Image (cartoon, coloured by chain):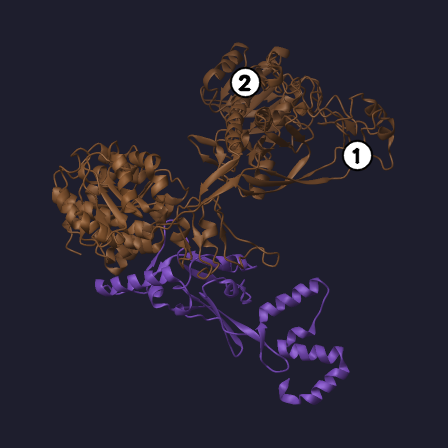
Amino acid sequence: MDTLVKKFDEINLENRKLLIELIKKFSSSGGKELKEGNAVKPLHEIFFAGRAIIDDEKCIACGACAETCPTGALSIRDDENIRTISHTHQLCIACKRCETSCEDKAIKIEVELNLKDFIEGNLRKKKSAELKLCKECKKPVGPVASIARIAEKLKEEGIELSELDYCQKCRKWRTAYESVPKLSIYLQRSYPDGEK
Amino acid sequence: MKKSEGTKKSLDKSTGIFLCSCSEEISKTINFDNLAEFLGSIPDVKVELVRHLLCQEPDLTFLAEEIEKNKYQKVIIAACSPQYITKIFEKSFLEKLVTLEYFEIVNIREGCAWVHIDNPSDALNKTKALIQVSLERARRNEKVLSRKIGIETKAVVIGGGTAGVAAAFELAEAGVKTYLLEKKPYLGGIAAKIGKVVPTDDCAMCTAFMDSNNLEICRKCIYRSRIDANDNLEIITQADVKKLKGSPGDFSVTFEASPRFVDIKKCILCKKCEEVCPVDGIKEFPYATNSRKAIYLPIPQAIPRGYMVERSLCPPECRRCEDICPTRAIDLNQKEEKREIRCGSVIVATGIEMFNPSPLKEYGYGRFPNVINQVELARMLDPDGPTRGSVVAPSTGKPAKKIVMVQCVGSRDKYHEYCSELCCIFALKHANVIKERTDAEVTVCYIDIRSHGFYERYYLEARDKWVNFIKGRPSEITENPQTRELCVQVEDALLNQDLRLSADLVVLSAALIPSEGTQEISKTSNLNLNNYGFIKEYYGKNRSSETESIGIYVAGGASGPKNIPSSVAHAGAAATKALIEIKRQQAHRRLKVASVNDDLCIKCEICMKICPFHAVEGIFSDESPVLLTKPPKVNELVCVNCGQCSAYCPTGAIQAKNYNRESVFAQIEGILKNNFITPKIVTFLCLECAYAAMDIAGLQKLQYPASILPIGLPCAGKTTMLDILKSFELGADGVLVGGCQTCHFKNGKELMITQVELTKSVMDLVGIDKGRLDFFVTAIADSRKFLDKARNITEKIKKMANF
């Protein structure tokens, strides 16, 4: 799966950019050094900036939140067999689309402003989950918990699929083998090994 | 200014500034020669001669002639408050000569000359700054288009209770084609179930209607006036509203009407069907003495007049009623009907219902058969009701001898904190009726008897009739399982004594809550609710029959508990509002509205959530019913250009018309540039109350520091941290933000306060003294608040070291 990390400059958060520039300017001339954990909470819930809290037990690392995040504040990174979900405070606009998209209510956005992170754009790791690897090619298929959820839902419908153990590419090949054996033999001949 | 110069550069000098001395009122403080010289140095500006009274003839004619002669595209008039003079200019020449957006009035009398009398040099500086702000604004303003909207000439009233009937009747009488949708099979709502109502002590169906076709006869009840015979009124019963959408002047109401199985027009009420119907013994309450059949007349006075069939009770294949009907009115194969009506106005009159007090376990409602509520008692007292007017103990069916009423059950407590208004009078009336008809002993346990106004007579009457009153909320009601007799435990707070009252009937005056229909309609139509779940009025003081969705009105109990007289009055007001809207037939709307730049939009939906009027509409597809996939659109008829959306848009994709980010920044720059006043305090004021409060202070010539440099914004909620910090960057020594006591755009006040407090914290962190920023909220009449803050912040900043 592609990584969804976007850079601040790539996103058109014009108002946000101007604000950060202003705060940077004042903070450097004011001579006050920003410390960790200087979080400021607004009086009321407003759409401004937020900190993501992910419930480790509920989260299955499906990545729906990052998909729906309009600014790329939530990002996914798949390395080897570990998926990391991170949150960039600087990009977060507290729109809470991630909360809407999360089926398990595992993610929560706490509206607050943490000036250091806000200016520096630090990436905070929020969740790491084990990835299931393809039986065939050993490439990641998806998070273990997420795949288990899919299998469970399919079971409720009365379907059991062995395809869940394989990555998208290998899945296609397998389907091709099973449904049209002759064609697959032909394909195998035309594309020996490695291409699988 | 010489003429030769003027002709040579006439093309460049596209902006004309007119200075009004206001019969020396302004010029005695402000040095106009100096001012004219300064303004003349601005490249594209021509300063006209100073006139004494621009708002009156002959100067008005002079103004029009000059604008026409010099072909000014933009005109700035420096005079008094726009509140007084805008209309004068609009009437005399504005529409013909200049586009409204390119015309600015600078308030240099109330805003400057009158309030800085002792400080002419600062007053001059401030005048320059204010004129520069107007110039910046006029330069950036865009033309506002207008649109003609046709308005549908029909009206829909949802809910056929007291208020709904009254509103629909008024509309139909006024000649508007009106559709009255009622969920039940007959009109009248709760009132139709009650035999006798306050304050006239007669039947509820009297709602004082007057048939305009028969002026000589004042027909006062819906039964006799036959409102269903009105050509303009179509009554649709058993209708369930599924969808209500659209924009002002063009709504669409979709509903499903369940079949009645009887054609109202053909039914002659001969009762033959009822006689042959094999299904018998259906009772409204278990203790009812009368019963009905599967085909029945709901109530004798029912409008529409006709039988109906409860089809679910019919035995299969039974067609007896259909066969015997002499007029062939019955059709047992009738199907559900789905319809859509387009209309110009909608009145929501979905009413109230009684709270089910079973969560209050100590009172045993639902467990003990002899504990009932006031509506059930009203049914008993109705001569046409289930017990034919006698008050009985449900367990035995015998007349009740000892009756205890408990007030405020579920209201003024943890269930509903409000007072339901009607229950006291409801209970007193019932106590009186019982005393009139029987010799039963009646006791009322109350917290306070709230029989306001003329209703006090019901209390006096009850006392005279020896109804017992006990001040105290009963702690528990217990039942003797054998005899079903009840025991009410109550502490009499006046005698400081514990009492145990025995009773064979306990009546709970349960809270009045939004009806199921009210809750449903708020979901289907996106209507806002108040804290208690009733439909929120547009403005409680003087616009209580309007909802926050423009073009949808509310009548009766849907917006809060109301008795019959107030419901009818409220309905009349709603009908008038709807009528005004419809009778215009065509509306002219200046499209001064926010707009979305699709390229910048990241579809975060914040604008949709923040818009107080739901004017930003997203289109959701079936694939993605919750999350937006396309940039949202602004409904031009609903948007009021308050700018709250633009304050929270992270990209600047949505911008209020003529108050976009660049324009506001330019205004801040304009007010601070070449300004020698110290300290300089940029003051963002909501153009509704806050700006007007400053105006009123000016009118009274109340002095405040010239440091206050006002910039008008459509709503204080539009002020953002960005605007505030930008002001500091551009050289402001302080920032003051002013909002309204009651925000005209709902949340603006809270949004502004939140932003200011947040900005203060940020300022603290980055090393700006947070005392440099302050805010106030005020009503127009309370200009003292503005003055206090203005003086206070100026003093504070003067004491601080230079920024």
Q: Is residue B531 visible?
A: no
Q: Which chain is purple?
A: A
Residue farthest to the top, as pictured: B464
For disc 2, the marked residue is B428
Residue type at tag 1:
Leu
Residue B463 location in percent, x, y? 51, 12
| Disc 2: host chain | B
In the figure, the shade used to draw chain B is: brown
Judge whether B231 appears above or below B747 on screen.
above
- State the quadrant of the C terminus of chain B: bottom left
Give percent across and percent down for residue A87. Answer: 44, 66
Numbered label attached to residue B313: 1
Name the element at disc 2. Answer: helix
Query: Which badge, 2 or 1, is on the more N-terminal residue?
Result: 1
Depth check: give the residue in front, B286 or B82.
B82
- Residue B389 vs residue A181, the one in the foreground: A181
